[in-house]
């Protein structure tokens, strides 16, 4: 290939740096700024003072534990409910299989927040607004698609010949599932669980609508801190604190899943 | 190669399968289908909840200029963002399809990066960056450009936030679509003397029509119902349907009117939803035909 | 080891019969190739023997015991898959040990058996490798080792070398033959390559459309094809339709003796069976030559316009367009797919 001066590439890269990279960088800089007066390009005083301040706040810790509790619950329930279904979709024949799969896909064709509103209206009747149960149900609903679709693909990806070869050397059906199918599908399933965990942790709209005002999860607390214009650095420190581990987790998940799984899952 | 007459997928004919999918199906029915139907039916009743068919709730919505403005700004934001998403992502996707190398990898990493940034953090970052007295304004001032007007709290605020948010998905769908076009198809067109623009229009775009439909319809659904970005970055009035519904439910405490707004959202989005389902159906059919 | 008896085996998918009331007996220690084109039912038949498909009807007797309803894990058969189907999350040793562990062999026994089988397939030293670190040929050897370590009564191979290149295929073919001789294990080998079947098998079963066309030694199959399908499928064969009347058959202006009923028939003659040279009878023209190394395969146009394939000696040095004289040699006649006469 002829190495030409790649003008288009440079323009795109520069635009993306301005549009994507710099905003994120701003948050990082703010997290380590003690003073940053406009229009200085960099903080007027660097420091970690706000890190200890954030970590001393009881509302941060209570929101963190609330989020951890709800997220763990949602992810666990989601796995419990969806993984058997994923296996059934991938490997079993039963009446209405195609129709059910299609109906799960159709669930994506609804505007999510409108669904959440109608669910919240229903929750009023059962006094579930402002309860952990309510938030768990709303968030559980948002995880279903991912938690069924990715593991279904994972189970389906396990070579049938591998399973047959195991039957051939004397393993019964359960043993085949345990020793061959599950270990083969495990990396993808683990990635799906990890992604569900991270996405649920940051799910904001459902938790806000159904949880408010009694349940304050981490993203809701961050939203309040940002909106109330308290101390700029609080939001920044919290963002960095919570986002870096989740970024690592998601990158790991993506490595396992390969780059086009997301797009393919949605029919690209 | 010649594995004989391919045996049909060997699956155990087992009602156990039904049992295993029962939990998510029931969950969907109970917490998605039922509440949605219930809300839709109730909003076609009287405003005081008495039985019988009535368009009262809708009359209230469509006679209220504030509600109508909100619907209008939602449609405007959705359409503008949709157009911008294609305008921004198609060139990037094309670039990534035809260029390899370090710069391409860098561009891909940057463009997909928002996928790993949760919505709250995106909003916060944008406020600090393009907001009043933000880093961008400082940068511009340093190169001598003054008079920067922040888009935050204007209708363009949500557009920028949503663009950020929806970029990776759109790009992934488009690159997946472009990957399906063979080099040979493009080279053959070059061979007969087609210009770049001509190739884009006559070869590339028709082949990624499915991808365009999928990403536009799914983006429509998520944009129209978005809450966080409009709430954090947009003006308080008029507001998008998402924050509007949220406020009607939580602050005004009028679940019936919130339900009416949700139903209107359902109806408008059903067009996009239908488009998505149809294109999925077509795709499956096409896949089956190629297999057979 | 074991003998295998298939009695009226059928496998139907909805209305389509992949295998159609087929019966076959295989003796203890025999190596049998199932040969046929795609869709002939050979793989389905093998999978039924292995227990991966349940026959719609019929019996599968191994040493006289019907195993048709027995699942694969309880059958004394072992299968080597086309895609080798090694478990990629286990290393070579673990792949081979898996079945042994299920059979509750002691640790020492497992080690001894694996050592023996690894030596047999020539992979000693590769125990700790993962399948992805092996070449295609090595992977297939591990798959074979994994099957034979369980000392099955019957070894089944489903186009095991289909994904390998020609050279490696021939090499592994020889190895399989040697291992099979050494262990004396009854073996059934599915292939769609006739050279593989001819080189490997004690007996070949030629299949088409779910039925057996012919069973025989490679020599029999080649020299005396029982059906027109086999005649056309194995090797190169000239098949020319001709009319029989009054015990004689008109071919390119010559009358051949054919003591069969009047009517249409197909005349079959191998390219190497033509008489060539002065006085052979038919004055013809060479229209095309293909150099096949030891000899030349020529397209020869007969006076009536029919083109036939003929083996020519290199020494003859014919060129396209040259005149040549050929005459009919040993031939066979087929009618309704069955052989009705051999000369």
Image: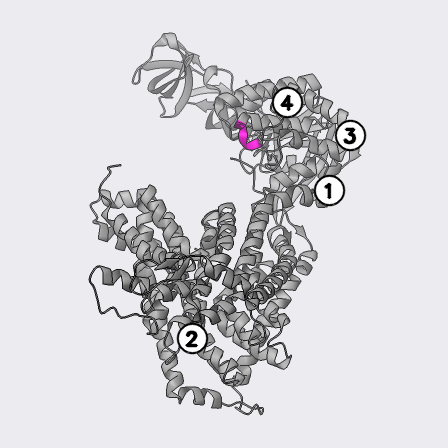
Residue C207 visible within the image? yes
Q: Nearer the viewer, residue B167 or A215?
A: A215
Q: Chain of mark 3?
A: C
Of helix, strand and loop, which one carries label 3?
loop
In this rendering, do the residues under marks 3 and 2 share a single chain?
no
In this rendering, do the residues under marks 1 and 3 share a single chain?
no
Q: Nearer the viewer, residue C312 or B165?
A: B165
Residue tagged 3 = C105
In this rendering, do the residues under marks 3 and 4 share a single chain?
yes
Residue tagged 4 = C203
The residue sitting at 46% across, 65% down in the picture is A234
* Lateral position of residue C196 relative to residue B200, left or right: right
For the C terminus of chain A, give its image quadrant.
Answer: bottom left
Of helix, strand and loop, which one carries label 1?
loop
Place of residue C167 in the rendered image (x, y in percent of width and height, measured from the top left) = 49, 21
Residue C214 visible within the image? no
Q: What's the CA distance linking mark 1 and mark 2?
A: 52 Å
Residue tagged 1 = A172
Among the two numbered marks 3 and 4 on one chain, the one whose residue lies closer to the N terminus: 3
Of helix, strand and loop, which one carries label 2?
helix
Place of residue C333 in the rendered image (x, y in percent of width and height, measured from the top left) = 53, 25
Residue tagged 2 = B268
* Lateral position of residue B195 relative to residue C114, left or right: left
Q: What's the CA distance linking mark 3 and mark 4?
A: 35 Å
* Residue range corresponding to the magenta coloring: C131-136
Place of residue A43 in the rendered image (x, y in percent of width and height, measured from the top left) = 35, 59
Q: What's the CA distance linking mark 1 and mark 4?
A: 34 Å
Label 3 with label 4: CB-CB less than 8 Å:
no
Tell me: residue B246, above or below residue A191. below
């Amino acid at each position: 290939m002829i190495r030409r001066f790649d003008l288009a590439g440079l323009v795109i890269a520069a635009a993306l740096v301005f549009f994507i990279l710099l905003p994120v960088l701003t948050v990082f800089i703010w997290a380590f700024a003690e003073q940053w007066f406009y229009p200085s390009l960099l903080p007027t005083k660097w420091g970690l003072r706000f890190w200890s301040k954030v970590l001393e706040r009881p509302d941060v810790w209570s929101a963190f534990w609330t989020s951890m509790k709800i997220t763990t619950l949602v992810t666990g329930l989601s796995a419990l409910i969806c993984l058997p279904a994923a296996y059934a979709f991938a490997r079993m024949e039963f009446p209405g299989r195609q129709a059910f799969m299609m109906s799960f896909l159709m669930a994506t064709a609804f505007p999510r927040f409108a669904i959440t509103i109608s669910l919240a209206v229903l929750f009023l009747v059962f006094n579930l607004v402002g309860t952990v149960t309510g938030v768990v149900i709303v968030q559980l609903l948002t995880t279903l698609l991912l938690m069924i679709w990715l593991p279904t693909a994972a189970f389906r990806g396990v070579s049938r010949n591998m399973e047959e070869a195991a039957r051939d050397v004397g393993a019964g059906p359960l043993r085949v599932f345990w020793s061959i199918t599950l270990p083969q599908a495990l990396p993808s399933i683990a990635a799906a669980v990890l992604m569900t965990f991270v996405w649920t942790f940051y799910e904001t709209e459902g938790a806000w609508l159904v949880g408010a005002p009694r349940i304050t999860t981490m993203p809701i607390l961050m939203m309040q801190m940002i909106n109330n214009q308290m101390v700029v650095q609080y939001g920044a420190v919290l963002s960095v604190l919570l986002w870096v581990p989740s970024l690592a987790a998601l990158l790991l998940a993506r490595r396992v899943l390969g780059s086009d799984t997301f797009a393919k899952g949605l029919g690209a | 190669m010649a594995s004989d007459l391919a045996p049909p997928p060997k699956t155990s004919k087992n009602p156990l399968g039904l049992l295993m999918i029962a939990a998510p199906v029931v969950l969907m029915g109970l917490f998605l289908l039922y509440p949605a139907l219930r809300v839709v039916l109730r909003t076609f009743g009287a405003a005081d909840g008495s039985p019988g068919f009535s368009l009262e709730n809708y009359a209230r919505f469509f006679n209220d200029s504030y509600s109508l403005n909100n619907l209008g700004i939602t449609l405007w934001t959705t359409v503008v963002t949709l157009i911008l998403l294609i305008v921004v992502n198609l060139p990037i996707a094309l670039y990534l399809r035809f260029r390899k190398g370090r710069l391409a990898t860098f561009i891909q990493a940057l463009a997909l990066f928002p996928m790993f940034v949760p919505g709250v953090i995106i909003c916060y970052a944008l406020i600090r960056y393009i907001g009043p007295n933000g880093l961008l304004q400082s940068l511009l001032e340093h190169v001598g450009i003054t008079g920067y007007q922040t888009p935050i709290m204007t209708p363009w605020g949500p557009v920028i936030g949503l663009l950020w948010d929806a970029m990776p998905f759109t790009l992934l769908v488009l690159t997946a679509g472009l990957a399906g076009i063979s080099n040979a198809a493009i080279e053959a067109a070059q061979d007969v003397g087609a210009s770049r623009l001509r190739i884009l229009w006559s070869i590339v775009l028709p082949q990624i029509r499915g991808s365009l439909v999928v990403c536009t319809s799914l983006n429509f659904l998520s944009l129209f119902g978005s809450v966080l970005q409009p709430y954090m970055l947009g003006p308080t009035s008029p507001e998008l349907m998402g924050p509007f519904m949220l406020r009607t439910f939580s602050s005004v405490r009028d679940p019936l009117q919130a339900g009416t707004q949700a139903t209107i959202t359902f109806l408008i989005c059903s067009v996009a939803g239908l488009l998505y389902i149809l294109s999925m159906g077509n795709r499956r059919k096409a896949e089956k035909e190629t297999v057979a | 080891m074991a003998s295998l008896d298939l009695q009226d085996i059928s496998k139907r998918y909805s209305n389509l019969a992949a295998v159609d009331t087929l019966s076959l007996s295989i003796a203890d220690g025999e190596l049998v190739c199932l040969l046929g084109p795609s869709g002939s039912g050979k793989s389905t038949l093998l999978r039924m023997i292995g227990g991966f498909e349940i026959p719609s009807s019929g019996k599968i007797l191994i040493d006289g015991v019907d195993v048709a309803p027995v699942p694969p894990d309880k059958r004394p058969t072992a299968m080597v898959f086309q895609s080798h189907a090694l478990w990629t999350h286990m290393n070579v040793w673990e792949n081979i040990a898996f079945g042994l562990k299920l059979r509750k062999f002691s640790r020492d026994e497992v080690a001894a058996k694996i050592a023996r089988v690894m030596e047999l397939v020539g992979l000693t030293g590769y125990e700790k490798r993962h399948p992805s670190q092996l070449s295609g040929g090595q992977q297939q050897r591990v798959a074979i080792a994994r099957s034979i370590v369980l000392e099955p009564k019957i070894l089944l191979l489903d186009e095991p070398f289909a994904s390998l290149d020609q050279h490696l295929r021939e090499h592994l073919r020889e190895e399989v033959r040697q291992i099979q001789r050494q262990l004396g294990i009854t073996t059934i080998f599915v292939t769609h390559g006739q050279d593989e079947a001819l080189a490997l098998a004690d007996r070949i079963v030629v299949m088409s459309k779910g039925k057996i066309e012919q069973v025989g030694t490679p020599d029999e199959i080649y020299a005396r094809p029982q059906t027109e399908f086999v005649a056309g499928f194995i090797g190169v064969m000239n098949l020319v339709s001709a009319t029989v009347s009054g015990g004689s058959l008109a071919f390119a202006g010559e009358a051949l003796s054919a003591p069969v009923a009047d009517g249409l028939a197909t005349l079959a003659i191998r390219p190497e069976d033509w008489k060539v040279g002065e006085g052979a009878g038919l004055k013809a023209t060479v229209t095309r030559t293909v150099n096949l190394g030891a000899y030349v395969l020529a397209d020869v146009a007969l006076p009536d316009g029919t083109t036939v394939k003929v083996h020519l000696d290199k020494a003859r040095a014919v060129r396209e367009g040259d005149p040549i004289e050929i005459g009919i040699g040993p031939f066979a006649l087929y009618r309704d797919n069955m052989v009705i006469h051999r000369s």
